[in-house]
Image (cartoon, rainbow, N blue to C red):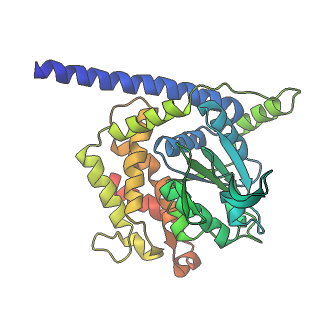
């Protein structure tokens, strides 16, 4: 009787993963109608959402970062808002504020006007253009999913995700994101230029009379069910040990540090291991597999680590690169 129940449970798990993979394949294809030639970027953005986390999109202007967030919000059925970050943007412009109102009888009361952060998918466009004070207004929301205004706690909608963009080329008038805020992003998603064939398709699809529209394939409840499924996917002991070895080998001065960490000023903290543990499960789910493997870790390590590490000044002067250091670490751990 126990064996039958166990077999039923296994079949249910397999069926859930297969159904989720089929749904996610449709979601990826639908987003791909609007975002052409950026399949890896779409996958990483979906992984961040499936893990219940946030993503930092880094790329030059005109690479469809805004278009990606708009398409994801539409296809996933999420309430989405966009904030253009500028040097004069204030925390209240994001969080909202209380205003004093007078009613017909002459009485006065405060009414809270919600800011754009009260949404399910927030696009923080050019986040590094805002002042540190305004950037810090996102910290509590990104980590705790609530904000405190006028001494009162106000919960954000569920699910809540931030996809922020950053232009790596134009740095004049920008404020580098502090390490504490960078660590809040589950992954850094580098958006590169498309290849020639993809760029040709972009030209043809976006310069006609009609723009491509996408269908809504999910809603918030379905997405949250997928997020729970990601956390239910088992992670093998070998993958857990590899994640620990990778993260700990990236910390300068640690007993387990790899020789390449001599090029680093600092390394990733425990949140990097948490991010990898979730991301490898979501990556496996995207590809219809029941459990993650070392290959998933190899694929996701750069995106989970690069914004949680920094080269020393001497290493930069010597021409070392952060991707090169991460490649050394991954090769030592993953083979």
- Residue 132 percent location from the top left of the image: 65, 72
- Residue 95 percent location from the top left of the image: 65, 58
Quarter assignment of residue 290: top left
Judged left or right of residue 260, residue 33 is right
In the displayed image of the protein, which residue is found farthest to the right? Answer: 209
- Work out which quarter of the rendered image holds the N terminus and state it: top left
Judged left or right of residue 167, residue 161 is left
Judged left or right of residue 208, residue 257 is left
Quarter assignment of residue 20: top left
Location of residue 270 with respect to 69 vertically, above or below:
below
**Which residue sits at x=46%, y=65%?**
325
In the displayed image of the protein, which residue is found farthest to the bottom? Answer: 314
**Which residue sits at x=34%, y=66%?**
249
- Residue 64 percent location from the top left of the image: 72, 44
- Residue 153 percent location from the top left of the image: 53, 58
**Which residue sits at x=42%, y=34%?**
285
């Amino acid at each position: 009787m126990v064996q039958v129940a166990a077999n039923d449970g296994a079949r249910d798990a397999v069926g859930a993963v297969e159904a989720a993979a089929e749904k996610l394949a449709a979601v990826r294809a639908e987003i791909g109608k609007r975002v052409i030639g950026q399949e890896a970027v779409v996958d990483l953005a979906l992984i961040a959402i499936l893990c219940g986390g946030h993503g930092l999109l880094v790329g030059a202007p005109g690479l469809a970062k805004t278009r990606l967030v708009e398409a994801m919000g539409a296809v996933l059925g999420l309430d989405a808002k966009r904030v253009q970050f500028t040097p004069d943007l204030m925390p209240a412009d994001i969080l909202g504020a209380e205003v004093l109102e007078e009613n017909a009888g002459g009485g006065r009361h405060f009414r809270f006007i919600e800011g754009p952060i009260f949404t399910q998918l927030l696009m923080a466009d050019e986040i590094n253009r805002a002042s540190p004070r305004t950037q810090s207004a996102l910290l509590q929301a990104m980590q705790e999913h609530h904000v405190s205004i006028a001494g009162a706690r106000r919960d954000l909608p569920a699910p809540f995700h931030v996809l922020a963009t950053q232009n790596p080329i134009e740095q004049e008038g920008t404020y580098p994101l502090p390490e504490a805020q960078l660590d809040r992003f589950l992954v850094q998603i580098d958006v590169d230029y498309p290849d020639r064939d993809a760029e040709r398709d972009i030209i043809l699809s976006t310069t006609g009379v009609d723009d491509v529209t996408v269908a809504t394939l999910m809603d918030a409840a379905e997405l949250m069910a997928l997020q729970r499924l990601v956390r239910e996917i088992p992670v093998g002991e070998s993958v857990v040990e590899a994640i620990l070895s990778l993260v700990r080998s990236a910390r300068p001065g640690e007993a387990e540090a790899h020789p390449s960490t001599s090029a680093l000023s600092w390394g990733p903290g425990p949140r990097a291991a948490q991010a990898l543990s979730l991301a490898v499960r979501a990556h496996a789910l995207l590809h219809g597999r029941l459990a993650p493997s070392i290959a998933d870790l190899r694929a996701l390590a750069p995106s989970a680590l690069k914004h949680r590490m920094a080269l020393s000044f001497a290493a930069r002067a010597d021409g070392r690169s952060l991707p090169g250091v991460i490649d050394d670490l991954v090769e030592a751990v993953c083979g």
